[in-house]
Image (cartoon, rainbow, N blue to C red):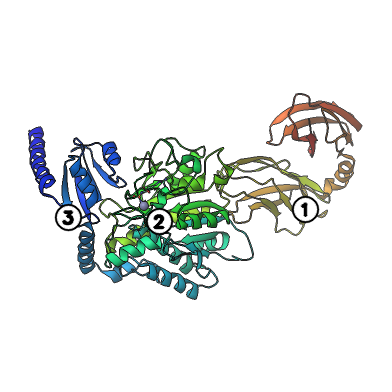
Amino acid sequence: MKKIVVTLIFIIGFLNINLFAQTGEFENEAFYRVEIHLNSASIHDLIEMGVSIDHVHNNHKSNTIIAELAGAELALMKENSVYFEVLVEDVSQWYVSRMQKDLQSFDLNKAMKNAPENFQLGSMGGHKTFEEVVEALDQMYELFPDLITEKFSIGESIEGREIWAVWIGTELEEEEKPQALYTSLTHAREPNSMMAVIYYMWWLLENYETDNTATFIVDNRHLAFIPVLNPDGYEFNRVNNPNGGGMHRKNRRPVGSWRQGVDLNRNFGPFQFWDHPNGGSDATNPNSDVYRGAEPFSEPETDALRSFVYANDFRTAFNYHTFSNLLIYPYGALQRVTVDHHILEGYAIEMTQYNNYVYGTDDETVGYSTRGNSDDWMYGLEAGNPRDRMNIIAFTPEVGSWSDYFWPPPSRIIPLSEENLHPNILLALYAGPDLMYSSDMVPEPDVLILEAGAENHVSFTFGELYNYGRYEIKPQLTLISDNDDFFISFDTVDIPAIEADTTFSGITDSFIIEPDASMQDGEEVTVILKMSAPWLDISPEWEYTFTVQGSATAHRDDEIAQKFNLKQNYPNPFNPTTLIRFTLPEHNHVTLDVFDITGRKVQNLVNDALPSGQHSVSFDAAHLASGVYIYRLQAGSYTLTRKMTLTK
Ligand code: 0X9
Ligand code: ZN
């Protein structure tokens, strides 16, 4: 029964289409929403014909796709006997009437309650015009001159408009901080890309000093914003459709007979992808909506962005588009993932935690390859032209659902912007150092009993500290006690910088603690080990209790300690043998072990009862790799460690 109904519907549909195919006359530059029957032409056939398949909704059940296409494309399909049905005659008008209907029913005041105070909708169906974006940038600077720069131009569009940028952050002139980049309106018909960015900018500025996250980001990152990368295309849409709904996508280079321009999101490098056989851009037809232009960066808009990116050091980027609730990452031109896939995917999982956008490569999301998109270029090709290797972790969020389409109604602008706040925040955080450690990873001190009236050397062994961010962590460890008798005479040590996407584990240098000679035997002191690093959002702390070996035994132990001595090995650096000498004050059981820098024991040299006096042991490291090693002498409750370097 079901089958019959489906067949009936199909036949009726079929008749309709035929009707259209015979009588339809289409205006070249007007946009229509159509349903195309794939049994009459495959997606591949459509692309070959020159029909732009950048945003199609697949209906697998009926084997159709829904697309918004120009009249000229409909004519092309008609010529090629493709069966399609027109669902909406004038898409731009459809958008406008939807916006107007929405405006009547939607309570603006209520919607604005949760939005940043200064965030305002624009005059184009709720979306800001180019001029209104400029006004917003000026207003931001006027209200928050300490947190944002005045707008500056990164270059001119092909029709001579300025491509405006700003920085948000503190100490913008004085200091270099981890940088992230946000761009939008590469495609002129995707205004909510820009609205989401403006919304985020106001959120950062207004919440500085009231919200911890906003404050942290503004103080510890430098964020660049380019809200309108394609001002000409966007202005073209405004002039032709002042109430919104304009469907022009590309820039306004005067090429093409009925649809002018170059698709800026096909005009980037890497140069190696330009002619990639996967396709994903149109090489020859300037009317195509995915026409790539004459060569990579042939367009002043992409060229301006390239210069700006070269002049800075961005670690992460969002290149905002709309729509279909996606978070896309490289590669777009290749049908494979990058070597940094674990990072891209890991970030994407966290970024989409609340908005549930679908994440993946182009192949996995939009389902077509894109040659010359911004993200492939910003990321770069591994082992490719170094000029192309920026190594920026770049994503394209595609804001909005299939019912929002390109011009979401006003009531949708705030929710769509709001649902991208979380990913925007994470993008800024990931641009910097970002520590990941498990709470059960507690650095272990080598001694817990300390002698009163003596210098005690204490070092810590670390398990796993992973830098999940894109900027190196330069950690500093500080040991703190609020007990005045517990004097920490050497309270800061550095551990080696932890590069992006690497893990640190190993033994630190020694802190020196000198408990006052008056301290009692068995007295306990709490000490905090604190790790901090520039621009790091969490400073982990660990607490320890040390027990003092007090005054009763201190005097004798002091003497013993003075005589208990571990000398620097000789020679050092060495290859492959060296001599380790130590002095024992009394007969004792002694162990002497060698560890690698990760804390793994590589050799035991002594495990024996030895008489007091001087001892020496030869260490042969022929079987070990070059590097720093630690040797540790333990005799009763005393421990001493030193470092040595093997250079082969
Ligand atoms: O086709 C495009 O350029 C993007 N879709 S849109 O509908 N906004 O035009 C998707 C390109 C995304 N690819 C990558 N940036 N990797
Ligand atoms: Zn787009």
Q: Is residue 365 left or right of residue 580?
A: left
Other-residue count near label 1 (Cα within 10 Å), few / some / many at <14 / 14–19 / ≥20: some
- The residue at which mark 1 appears reads as 490
Dot 2 amino acid type: Thr
Task: Give SS at disc 3.
Answer: loop
Of badges 1 and 3, nearer the viewer stands 3
Q: Is residue 125 visible?
A: no
Quick check: 317 above or below 133? above
The first of marks 3 and 2 along the sequence is 3
Residue 582 spot, x, y in % from top left: 87, 35
Question: What's under tag 3, amino acid-wise?
Answer: Glu
User: Would residue 446 be visible to someone looking at this image?
Assistant: yes
- Label 1 amino acid? Phe
For the point 73% across and 47% down, the residue is: 547
Q: Residue at x 76, y 27 (%)?
A: 604
Instruction: Tell me if the residue at label 2 has its CB under 8 Å from ligand 2.
Output: yes
Asked if the residue at tag 3 contacts the one at tag 1, i.e. Cβ–Cβ closer than 8 Å, the answer is no
Residue at the spot of label 2: 186
The quadrant where residue 283 appears = top left
